[in-house]
Amino acid sequence: MRDAASTGLVDALCRASRRDAGLVPEALDWPESVAGAWCFSPERISIHGTAAYEALDEDGRKRLSLLEAVSFFSINVHGERLLIEGLARRLQRPETQAYTRYLHHFLAEENRHLECFGEFCRRYAGGVYPEKKVALAPIDPASHDDFVFFARVLLFEEIVDGYNRAMARDERLHPLLRRINALHHQDERRHLAFGRQLAHEIWREHAPGWSAEERRRLQDDLRLFLESTWHEYYNPDVYRDAGLADVFRVRAEGWGTHRARRRAASEEATRFLVRAGILESEEAA
Ligand SMILES: [Fe+2]
Ligand SMILES: [Fe+2]
């Protein structure tokens, strides 16, 4: 973030963060129950369109939508926890001096998001679902590590934001769910603007010194990360809690049914990285 333009971006983002707190616990009213309401857009439920979904009655589908919301928020809790760890490690380092001010806002905002998502899962279900993330290989040296960290964050947040934007507008959803999605999007817009700029700058600065083999490895890492992120959206614990039998078969059916939808969402998430020359094609998981 050494460019004059991006220093301006850091100032603008810090001002916006001070002015527009989005998803904070104080902004939410927690009703006694959300039972009987849609908590997740039906078409975005991971097994929508499968035989198992079709066999459920309206109440069963709404119950499933609550569990899918809990799973989505759990993905956010685990993802943002790792994000907070990574941001904390990067605070006040000489290399991050130009944008450390914004990292403090970023970290503080993710901490509040985690609080809200965790609270929802605790109030309306048995708590946060366990982490399903596949451990990916550590990356070094430092310039690779920073690039991979911020590029993974960008992909993770782009996918989440696609869901947030759609569900914030979905009038079938319980008002609490619409509000959580809308407020999260309000903060994530800034994180995405920052992440796009930073991933691009690190790439521009370091990639010319990386061999073709190194660049290919980093690109493979991002594709693998994208695929492993999508796997988290198909959670057998959800299907079990919804009372479905043979949950791994159900999961496989959902995964197969939603290939085109996933591809479209991945392309949206990778579009920036392709335009920046970081990925060669909008390949999806
Ligand atoms: Fe967040
Ligand atoms: Fe974020």
Image (cartoon, grey):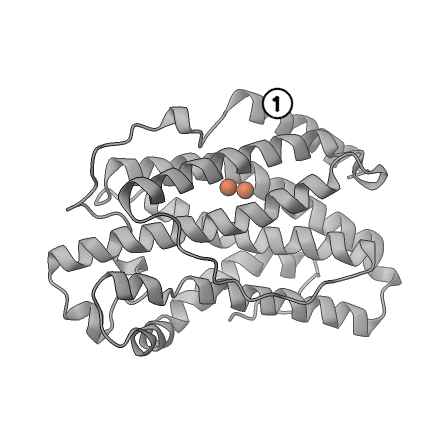
Q: Secondary structure at mark 1?
A: helix
Residue bearing the label numbered 1: 15
Q: As drawn, which residue projects farthest toward the right? A: 209
Q: Nearer the viewer, residue 206 or 85?
A: 85
Mark 1 is surrounded, within 10 Å at the Cα level, by few (under 14), some (14 to 19) or many (20 or more) other residues, namely: few
- Residue 80 pos. (x, y %): 54, 46
- Residue 69 pos. (x, y %): 33, 50
Q: Is residue 119 left or right of residue 59?
A: right
Q: Is residue 226 left or right of residue 239?
A: right
- Residue 12 pos. (x, y %): 64, 27
The quadrant in which residue 88 appears is: top right
Image point (45%, 60%), residue name: 265
Image point (41%, 42%), residue name: 118
Q: As drawn, which residue projects farthest toward the front? A: 126
Image point (15%, 59%), residue name: 60
- Residue 13 pos. (x, y %): 62, 30
The quadrant in which residue 248 appears is: bottom left
Q: Is residue 133 left or right of residue 12?
A: left
Identify residue type, mark 1: Arg
Mark 1 Cβ inside 8 Å of ligand 2: no
Q: Nearer the viewer, residue 181 or 201?
A: 181
In what quadrant of the picture does the N terminus appear? top right
Image point (77%, 68%), residue name: 215
The quadrant in which residue 222 appears is: bottom right
